[in-house]
Amino acid sequence: MKFDLNLNWRIALPTIILSLFGIVMVYSASSYSASINYNDAFYFVKKQAIGVVLGLVAMLLLSNFDYKKLSKFKIASLILGFVLLLLVFIPGIGIESYGAKRWIGFGFFSFQASEVAKFCFIIFAASYMAKNYKRLNSFWKILPVISVGGVMCLLIMLEPNMSITICLGGLMLVMLLLGGIRIKHLGLLVVPAILLVPILIIIEPYRLNRLLAFLDPWASPQGEGFQLIQSLYSLGNGGLFGVGLFNSRQKYNFLPFSESDFIFSIIGEELGFVGAIGVVLIFLILIYNGYKVAMHSRDRLGFLLASGISSILAIQVLLNIAVVTGAVPPTGLPLPFISAGSTSLVVFMSAVGVVLNISKQSKIANLLN
């Protein structure tokens, strides 16, 4: 593998900026709670810094790894994704927290299986559709992608993790659409999915409670509505320019998960509307350039990989911000590159490395032509 640093900086630079900014915000959001709970104000920051270093290494390595070789690992990635999703249910390996089994633990090391699985799905779906693109107008030919995505969604739902289920389901539909699926076949997937949503809400009391809290959080200010109310207080307190970096009040155990799922609320409080919009703009630059790489890719595999990675990033950013601003019912979902959590950070940075390699090879091909 030939190693060089000739990167597409329109993608690499926003990734690095967001990741370094994430270290700062994780410290700001977690220093108080970490001091109280772990007797170490830097407890979460040290993990985040390690994640950034590992993510940068993975990003650089994959930027020099020929993305076309990923198609050889489509079955292996598929098996890996399913094995990880099943391991969370095995006692002694799966870790339960707040009533959900989403993590796999080996001694001092733990990670979230679904974060890895969704990118395993991208590799499989992109490789399969790139190879069979001439036959995707047949419903039976898209059935493998639907089946894999559907079973993964089911396993993630059983954890339960509705937010990642929504992300993966949305990603599957986007990739099928970009891969060339017929609109009527897409309708056969979308309509049942929409009809299934109210059933999934009703059969799980906590989902119904979250929906009611979303509709009227002040009806249960100390219960299900507490987190959303505190998030809105945090954003409202920030005003236009914020209360200043490290000066958030909500992080003092008022806003739960302020260093992870609700870190955007702390950004809005400390940096204000202007700072929050600035962060969104950096994400938009990264996502736009990811799709641009897809459009200029030299082959269908590169197009589907780059567009799939850009799509899951866009979906997850949109859903996270929608949750913390009260636009959709509350659900736990990290903000890519910024929220505390090394698994999400390393996996997303690795995925960016794949996009960088696609960009690099497209540029070389254009020069040769």
Image (spheres, rainbow, N blue to C red):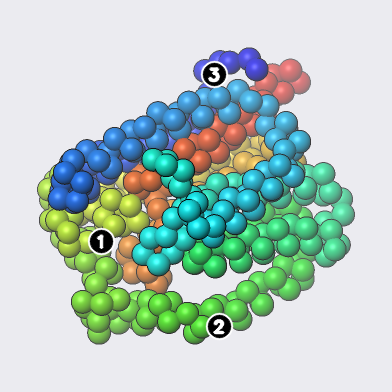
Residue mark closest to the camera, 2 vs 3 = 2
Res 232 label = none
Would residue 255 be found to the left or right of residue 196 on screen?
left
What residue sits 43% from the left and 77% below the top? 207
Q: Amino acid at mark 3?
A: Asn
Closest to the observer: 275 or 33?
A: 33
Q: Amino acid at mark 2?
A: Ile
Res 256 label = 1
Residue 232 locus on image (x, y percent): 24, 66
Circle 2 sits in a helix, a strand or a loop, which is it? helix
Instruction: Determine crowd level at label 1: few under 14, some 14-19, many 20+ residues with C-alpha closer than 10 A.
Output: some
What residue sits 40% from the left and 53% below the top? 334
- Label 1 and label 2: CA atoms lie apart by 28 Å
Circle 3 sits in a helix, a strand or a loop, which is it? loop
What residue sits 87% from the left and 54% below the top? 135
Q: Does 238 sit above or below residue 361?
A: below
The disc, 2 or 3, on the residue closer to the chain's N-terminal end is 3
The disc, 1 or 2, on the residue closer to the chain's N-terminal end is 2
Q: Amino acid at mark 1?
A: Pro
Image quadrant where residue 294 sits = top right
Residue 307 seen from this side: no
The disc, 1 or 3, on the residue closer to the chain's N-terminal end is 3
Residue 354 locus on image (x, y percent): 59, 34
Identify the residue position indicated by label 3 in the image: 6
Image quadrant where residue 211 sits = bottom left
What residue sits 39% from the left and 40% below the top? 108
Residue 241 locus on image (x, y percent): 17, 50
Circle 1 sits in a helix, a strand or a loop, which is it? loop
Res 199 label = 2
> What quarter of the picture does the C terminus occupy?
top right
Closest to the observer: 244 or 65?
A: 65
